Image (cartoon, helix red, strand yellow):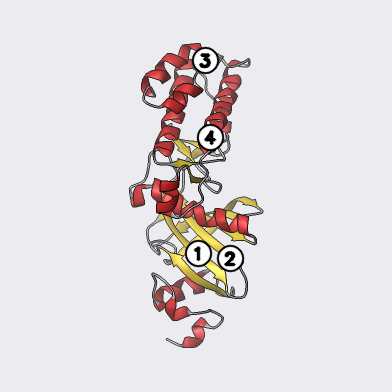
Amino acid sequence: MDDSEFEGYANFDDLMMMDKEANTKFTRQNYENIKFMLVRGDYKLLDKEYEKTRIIGTGAFGKIWIAYSKIFDINFVLKETNFYNEEYQINAYNEPIILKYLSYYGRCNKYILCYYDSITMYHQDNNEGIVLLATEYINGKTISKYNIDNLKELNRVYIELWKGLKIMHDMGIVHMDIHSENIMITETGEIKFIDFGKACAGNSKIGGDLEVTICENGYDSDLNNLKNVCIFLTENFTKHTLLVDPYIQNIKKIYKSSTNVLNFLQIS
């Protein structure tokens, strides 16, 4: 193997968690002309052969692709986050760590977008960089596009939303960006919270253990934002203001152990 393959990379022999062969596969594949230093990653999927098939999202952060892994024969979502300043860098760093934790380090969570793999690269000449985050591809639609046509289904969706949020909060994670475009419903009716780009730890213990940003006042923000999602769903269904009375008792039974949720459900 010719050392010229690695021209433009800094401290290549000291890179963590990967060997030269893995680096070669990765840099040849998609980023061979970018002079970045690879410094962190799991390398279970993204160092294998894959192709990006189509863009499904763009923004100041970067791009989101649907990609296909030829080795594993699966579709997955690839989020490319470019960071140019401290805020973007912190968010880009937090997201894969938090998602990996919420995915039980490989076993996945019914209510939360499943983490597959991630790689972080820093530019060798400045503080800019790229985070590549691979997650599950969800067959479904955002909840903003989900048409509910009966009261039983509306009640079921309510309960599933609160279950998902309760699991997240019980694990000490705050989403910080809950709205109808960041919750998906699968073809089989499962609720999935997505886009953890602004997520953080809800307490100092989890923040310290994961080494991510702490936002101890974030729980109330998530509760209020999910309330707005429920209002949105109900107003779409009923075409008038939120009618909570038929549903409150059922939800209380499920969440009677959760003080935060019970306090929230005292809707006047």
Where disc 3 sits, the SS reads loop
> Could you tell which of marks 1 and 2 lies nearer the N-terminus?
1
Where disc 2 sits, the SS reads strand
Disc 4 versus disc 2: nearer the observer: 4
Location of the C terminus by quadrant is top right
Amino acid carrying label 2: it is Gly
> Could you tell which of marks 3 and 2 lies nearer the N-terminus?
2
Does 245 appear above or below 120? above
Residue beneath disc 2:
129
Pointer 4 with pointer 3, Cβ within 8 A: no
Residue under the point 41% across and 61% down: 45
Disc 4 versus disc 3: nearer the observer: 4
Is residue 151 visible in the rendered structure shown here?
yes
Amino acid carrying label 3: it is Val
Amino acid carrying label 4: it is Asp
Where disc 1 sits, the SS reads strand
> Could you tell which of marks 4 and 2 lies nearer the N-terminus?
2
Residue 128 location in percent, x, y?
Answer: 61, 66
Which residue occupies the extreme top position in the image?
Answer: 245
Instruction: Measure how far apart labels 3 and 2 are at the Cα level.
Output: 47 Å
Answer few, some or many: residues within 10 Å of disc 3's Cα (few below 14, many 20 plus, some between 14 and 19).
Answer: some
Pointer 1 with pointer 3, Cβ within 8 A: no
- Residue 152: which quarter of the image? top left
Residue 244: mark: 3
Location of the N terminus by quadrant is bottom left
Residue beneath disc 1:
120
Answer few, some or many: residues within 10 Å of disc 4's Cα (few below 14, many 20 plus, some between 14 and 19).
Answer: some
Residue 177 location in percent, x, y?
Answer: 57, 40
Residue under the point 40% across and 17% down: 250
Residue beneath disc 4:
222
